Amino acid sequence: KAGVTQTPRYLIKTRGQQVTLSCSPISGHRSVSWYQQTPGQGLQFLFEYFSETQRNKGNFPGRFSGRQFSNSRSEMNVSTLELGDSALYLCASSSTSGGVKETQYFGPGTRLLVL
Amino acid sequence: KQEVTQIPAALSVPEGENLVLNCSFTDSAIYNLQWFRQDPGKGLTSLLLIQSSQREQTSGRLNASLDKSSGRSTLYIAASQPGDSATYLCAAYTGGGNKLTFGTGTQLKVEL
């Protein structure tokens, strides 16, 4: 089975722009979660989508949004980029939402640099 | 609010040494505790998942233990190798979808 894929892998944007990141989960997985990783804050949960519905949301401003398509692929969007949005954005997939026995499988991440 | 910390933040050991990484969490009402490995600039690889009803899990040279009452988990690596060099992250799952609360990570370097 192919793993979780994220595109693009690297991105450079300027302040005020918006960006869209894409995540394709493992085939058959219906849950996609997004995380932001920075040196200062570590890994922080952004949101989770399951069967096209947002199930959970972290403590991030409304500039961060996402969606999930019927094929379980997910996109996250960040509008009005700020310098502090520079980070590695990771997505993770799993077959269920809230399975205590099941781990999540992470993609390689998209590294976003905001200038 | 769940908070997860890991000590030490960085560790350097000679090849062949056995070592222990520590993870502490504030809310003992967890469903599971997971350990991940992250290589520089890469995503996370799942190593072990311990359910709240379990005390430990083993995979090859890795052994993870969980003590909910004290809010602690440890990852034991036997006979360390240079290929084990990476950042190790623990994550607590307290329900509510697939939200994981991650620790701050331990950066491990195994030297020849």
Image: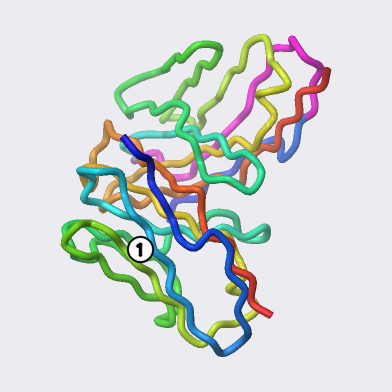
Q: Quadrant of residue B66?
A: top left
Q: Give the range drawn in magenta.
A: B12-29
Q: Is residue B52 above or below residue B29?
A: above
Q: Which residue is drawn at 46% across and 78% down?
A: A78
Q: Which residue is drawn at 31% across and 62% down?
A: A74
Q: Is residue B32 above or below residue A96?
A: above
Q: In which quarter of the image is residue A101?
A: top left
Pinpoint residue A87: horizontal percent, then vertical percent: 60, 64
Q: Is residue B100 above or below residue A23?
A: above
Q: Residue at x 28, y 70 (%)?
A: A67
> What amino acid does circle 1 point to?
Phe
Label 1: chain? A
Q: In this view, does A103 lie above or below A49?
A: above
Q: Is residue B99 magenta?
A: no
Query: What residue would you read off at disc 1?
Result: A47
> Within 10 angstroms of label 1, few (less than 14), some, or many (20 or more) residues?
many
